[in-house]
Image: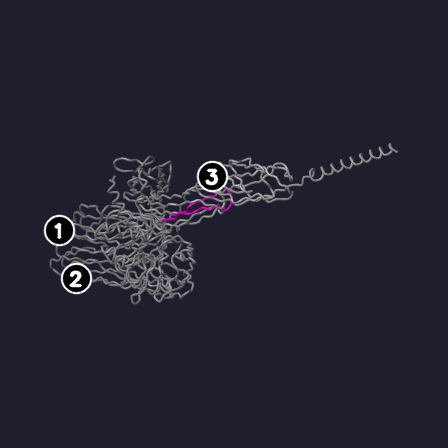
Amino acid sequence: MMGKPAALAIISFIILSTLPISYTIQSPEYYENITLYVVGKNVLVRYNFTGTEVGLIEPKILEEKFSGVDYFKLYVSQFDSFPTEYAYFSSIGYNILLCEYNIPSAAILYVHSKTVQEASSFSEEIENRTGLSFTYYGKNGEMFMFISPSSFVDVLENFLWKIIPTTYGGFTKLLDKRDVTFSAIREIGFIGKMVNGKVSQSIIVDILKTNAFSGNSLRTGLDIFLSSRVNSSDYTNLGNFKIISYGQIIEKSDAGYVKNDFVKKISELTITVPGNDVLHFPNITLAKATPSIIVEREFSKTALKFGEEFEVQVRVRNIGAADAENIKFEDSWWIGGGAFTLTAGKYSDQVSKLGPGENRTIVYRLKVQTRDTVSFYIRPLNITYFWNVSGERLAFNAVSNDAYMLLNQDGPSIYIIATLSTSQTSFGFRKKVTLDIKNRGSLTAFNITLYGESIEFLPPQESVQKVIEVDLENMSQPFKEEMFRCQWSNGKEVKGSVSNNIVLANSYDKMGITVLSLQRNIGQIISGDKIYLNMTLNLRSFGSKSVSNITVWENIPKGIKYVNGSLKQDEKGLYVFEESIGANSSKMYKYLFMVEDLSKNYVLGPAYAEYFLDGKKYSSLSTLNDAPIGLKITLHLDENNIFQNYSVNGYYSINNLGDKNVYRVSAKILYNPSINITMLSNPTNTSILKSGFEEKVYFKVNGKNLGLNNSVNLNVRYFFGGRQYNVNSTTVYVNVYTLPEIVFNVFGEAVEGKPFELKITVKNTAPLEIENIHFKILIPPQIKIIENLSPSTAKISNNTIEASIQKMGESSEETIILRLISGTAREYTLSSSELSFTYKGESITAPSQTAKVKVSDDIVSRYFIPLTVAIILMVAGRIALGLMKRGKNKIF
């Protein structure tokens, strides 16, 4: 087991190894030492920040603010396909494997400066410009190392592509058009061509790490539109589309021209595209079969006397899968000095072509012509041969084993021959190599050591065989050359012998690896005033073999506490141990962290696993995770209940209480269409919200339409750890109610000349308490106010009623009753002034009201009584007239 500091150191070292540094574009001569790499799942970008090139940081910023920063490198990586890097570190004995199921996602910044304080300040500048959130992770050599979790897509789409002066319009247009039908890792890169000190054009570089395609033909159907994004005299519309294969040779293409550089292991296909034209991604055939020559040189004896003859045999074999051409060699080590003469055979040869599996052997005999006592070293025989591919002849070298010659003396003489059946292999498969150790001297050799193994002695004219395994170092490695050395003693001194070279050729077929994958997920649980992190860690063994003695270490930052779950916590740290995990099997661990310090924005380092496979120790990393606990988002309204057409004040707050900055913060208020929101200050849109700072924005909510539960929500977007967060605040609700109103009602019937009662009712239908209600009622002059039945509420002056109500409760009414009389029958209009009141101290006015009051004719008074009187008078007249007639008759 290792202690926590050691684990952190190894993690730092391992994280460095996850980056495909060896596959970055080599710096042209005009690049200076200040360089940015962005290496990722689909993209490799490289800038320097000198001259007129566009980058993240301008030279003057470095000169003025960071004079102590000599240079820096930034890597942003996210791998989700086959192993991107495989490395063996002899100093610590670790093999590092990455594969499509083990996805390290991180940004790593290396700063070469005088002090860690200056490096930290510089990392903040990078944070400000990228949205990454760096944590200091220690030193790596002479450079300070900072690490941040990252989401490459977010960094790519929301930051990088917007500032790259490419002639086709940035990353997004390219990636949107990608329709890759194979699963090879593909990376897009950009470099600029300098002409007279200026960037004159962009070159799109497509790095193909081609290991996972079917067959050897790629067809993607990729259209790239080279429309100008930067229109200036410094750029040209003529674009070059360059495809660079690191490792595998581009054999042919249906467009462009191919240039191969075997020394740099680079194959380039370049296509020139006219401005504003459409480039169709060409069909490419990649060479899978390569030749591989091994040279074995045998001696019948290497310890001889004067007059003795011996035989030399040189065997040239093609163990590759393609023709080797124009093979020439001459084994002339013995010429000069007069020690030997040729007695039979030939010592040179020339072969125009040697096909796969074919061989050519020459045999010649030499006779010793000297009586001198001589010992000398026979250098390896060097052979040059060629591979004809893509119209070019690529040169290869093969060398034989060496040997020691003893003349007129006795002693041991060791040489080694290495053989294997075929050079074709793939990453993850180990090839068996047979080492034939031969003593062609006259005495026994002692203490022969080879690959850590020891052979105590080897008698003269005897041999011993050892079988060892070799493999490719990474999945993109096209060839690997091996030569095997051993030490031996003649009893007086130690000598060394070297075998012939063998070359493993990568066929880029299915890879035979077994790897342990770690995938860690994080979720937040809020319980009251406590925040928990719910962790899930999945271990899975991919491949055909079991892995054993697995220890997984969790690294939690200060401020987070382990609560419970599958892990064990003791003085060694926080870990879990498994004896073994079978092939294609998995284990899941669940555990709970509690956030003790809520004032931090956490970056959780990767979980780290050690395991053994075939006796070798390997390691694996999980993804990094981030938890911006310290960022608090608040949405506040002074009131949740308002009257129609009136407003309530509110604000939102984005408060970074954490210890790390957050970046590219923007906010938008989302609300129901029944209400309106008016911003009283500019909405948040800031590039950085530093630790301890707060964004506070005020606004008003207006009740446009009646309705309940009108939602208001704040959407906030920000970057932390290179990842874009899109979060919503808690939702608040606004209820919009109707304003108080005045209602007029007449008791009974209003009849002219008779008193009637008028009921004036103030209705507050809202569940809100209002105060200081005031209004006036205008009574037409034809109507007289006889009596005020509500003297405490209403005052009368000149046919004007002035009403004041101190307070009205929720959903309540207040009534004013008046006794009125009108001498004229007609329809009258009663009108009120606006109704004013206060709610929560705010003065509000409701619209005025009108009502019609009809005063009817008094039929009895006006018609029936006069008629009755008339009838009575008429009857009385008739009676009187009758009496008068009756009296008159009596007299006469």
Q: Which residues are the magenta region?
A: 697-718
The quadrant the C terminus occupies is: top right
Q: Amino acid at mark 2?
A: Phe
Looking at the image, residue 82 sits to the left or right of residue 416; the answer is right
Which sits in the foreground, 259 or 851?
851
Q: Quadrant of residue 651?
A: top left
Q: Which residue is mark 2?
A: 340
User: Residue 208 location, x and y as percent?
Assistant: 35, 56
Which sits in the foreground, 839 or 672?
839
Q: Residues within 10 Å of mark 3 (few under 14, many from 20)?
A: some
Residues at marks 1 and 3, CA–CA distance in whole angstroms: 113 Å
Q: Residues within 10 Å of mark 1 (few under 14, many from 20)?
A: few
Q: Quadrant of residue 615?
A: top left
The quadrant the N terminus occupies is: top left
- Of callouts 1 and 3, which one flags the residue occurring earlier in the amino acid sequence? 1
Residues at marks 2 and 3, CA–CA distance in whole angstroms: 126 Å
Instruction: Name the magenta segment's main secondary structure.
Output: strand
Q: How many numbered marks, from 0 up?
A: 3
Which sits in the foreground, 9 or 235?
235
Residues at marks 2 and 1, CA–CA distance in whole angstroms: 27 Å
Q: Amino acid at mark 1?
A: Glu
- Of callouts 2 and 3, which one flags the residue occurring earlier in the amino acid sequence? 2
Q: In the rendered image, is residue 288 in sight?
A: no
Residue 42, magenta (yes or no) = no
Q: Which residue is mark 3?
A: 771
Q: What is the number of the mark on residue 493?
A: 1
User: Residue 168 location, x and y as percent?
Assistant: 39, 61
Q: Amino acid at mark 3?
A: Glu
SS of the residue at dot 3?
Answer: strand
Is label 1 in contact with label 3 (beta carbons under 8 Å)?
no
